[in-house]
Image (spheres, coloured by chain):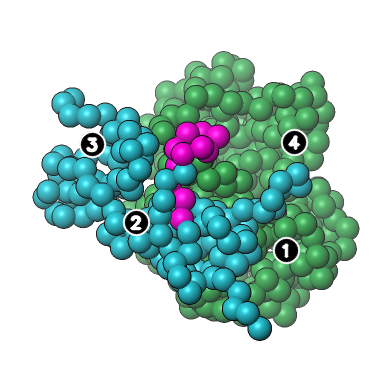
Chain colours: A green, B cyan
Amino acid sequence: MSPRDLRGATAIVGVAESDLGEVGPDRYAIELAAQAAGAALAEAGLTTRDVDGLFCAIAGRGMAPLDVAEYLGIRPRYTDGTMVGGSSFVSHLHHAALAITSGACDVALIVYGSTARSDSGRGRLATGPPELPSYEAAYRPRMPITGYALAAARHMHQFGTTRTQLAEVAVAARRWARLNPKAFARDPLTVEDVLAARMVSSPLTSLDCCLVTDGGGAVVVTSAARAADLPRPPVYLLGAGEAHWHRAISQMPDLTVTAATESSARAYAMAGVGPEDVDMVQLYDAFTINTILFLEDLGFCAKGEGGDFVSGGRIAPGGDLPVNTNGGGLSYCHPGMYGIFPLIEATRQIRGEAGMRQQPGVTIAVAHGNGGQLSSQVTAVLGGRDSL
Amino acid sequence: MTGPAPHREYTDRVAAGTVPCQTCDGCLSAVFPPRVICPSCGGADLRWSESAGLGTVYSASVLSPRDADPYSVVLVDLDERFRMMSTVVDIPARDVRIGMRVRARVERDGPSGPRIVFTAEEGEGRHEPA
């Protein structure tokens, strides 16, 4: 089987978020994961009894698939607990397509939950011994923010990117969030607000950084053949690609070039499309610099031109390229590992179910996940029926 | 495995006042952080060496805790061709610049034990008198 054989072979048939925002001290991550799973399966016209492939990652839970399977009463014949940070779920989508097309499972459930916001006030944050010695901790970086700040500083130095251009990313995300009733941060936001906010790790202010919310999500995937008999319009996986080159930011070869250059090239090659064919982009915006780096590395503009590209509202509502139409990790929801939400939003936009923020004629959307410190990059190209 | 445990050897060498790294006998790459196998060629013949401690700031961020002085977190490209995270001391954090030449020294009284920090080389980063 060649990678091209995956094109259009599987489809997303159900998506859902759990409750988002702040769910309170009595709730647990697995409950949000289960809530989202139930809703996504219901949307797909399926139940937990139909699920025979389980794909999940939960921060701090090394055996998350076992926790989730027991909780949901699923007895999978195929399990994937790939944990590559926030990009895990886009990776799971790729792996699910491989598993389904090879016959290892029929119905894949990708699921995530987190109570990051509610945990922060009650000493429930998972802490354990470091897996490996750290060669960074002695310098007290505030991770992950400082890692992204170092990338932003280098991008500014090398290409003349400005703090105002970074702020444009946050403002565009907020303008989208104002169209999304589920978004956490919906107050008006200006470039001046972002620039004047508290500097956390220069050049990033608190408003260059993502939210910390609770939240879960689920995505149900099956074969294109089976998808045709299910209630919602199938959203086909046209292409997927993965790449990672480092874990620690101090080991990233070039802070201005991410492995998304490779992951996106693989995804486009499988899909047989290029950035010029893409109607919208849902990417992992943990920090404002992410959007600039990924728009460059996914081929929407040349390296170094991301700052100019996002200026003047080009990625905001009414702009040339809709980016993060749900409001993104910056303004909609960020429970720590955001990567399932780009899949959910891209699916809804392709189906035409995105309410006030729905974009006309979305045939092909890119969903891009990032994990670690610009470390793991996973790109998926999704499309509606007309894309096949 | 034979030979010294990499992290223990590293911390001992830092405590002795040096800037340690490893060099691969197979491909001559500088290797940092310490390992048991070369990430460039896969070779297992890594020998300990010392950096002269001179490098260039590759990127920099300033952190300003509410209850303490601002400090820099930098990535330094050592002249021996490896990169490490560190901090530039002896000048205000806001004066640390990408491209600045810096020199390592071992700070012995850090809260987490000895650590390698950097100072700006002569003519770098200090405000010139008006």
Tell me the residue that label 3 is attached to: B36
Task: Relative to A73, say whether A221 is above or below.
Answer: below
Tell me the residue that label 2 is attached to: B53
Residue B109 image point, x, y percent: 51, 37
**Magenta-highlighted stretch: main secondary structure?**
loop
- Is residue A183 shown left or right of residue B17? right
First reached walking from the N terminus: tag 2 or tag 3: 3
Q: Do tag 1 and tag 3 residues touch (Cβ < 8 Å)?
A: no
Q: Nearer the viewer, residue A17 or A312?
A: A312
For the record, the magenta segment spans B108-118
Magenta span has B110?
Answer: yes
Residue A25 image point, x, y percent: 80, 24
Amino acid type, label 3: Val
Residue depicted at 18% across the width and 42% down the height: B46
| CA separation in Å, label 3 and label 4 | 39 Å
| CA separation in Å, label 2 and label 3 | 23 Å
Q: Residues within 10 Å of mark 2 (few under 14, many from 20)?
A: some
Task: Relative to B106, say whether A266 is above or below.
Answer: below
Q: Chain of mark 1?
A: A
Q: Nearer the viewer, residue A274 or B130?
A: B130
| Residues tagged by mark 1 and mark 2 found on one chain of the structure | no
Q: Residues within 10 Å of mark 3 (few under 14, many from 20)?
A: some
**SS at badge 4:** helix
Q: Chain of mark 3?
A: B
| Residues tagged by mark 2 and mark 4 found on one chain of the structure | no
Residue depicted at 59% across the width and 78% down the height: B128
Amino acid type, label 4: Arg
Tell me the residue that label 1 is attached to: A170
| CA separation in Å, label 4 and label 1 | 20 Å
The quarter of the picture where residue A258 lies is bottom left
- Is residue B78 shown left or right of residue B114? left
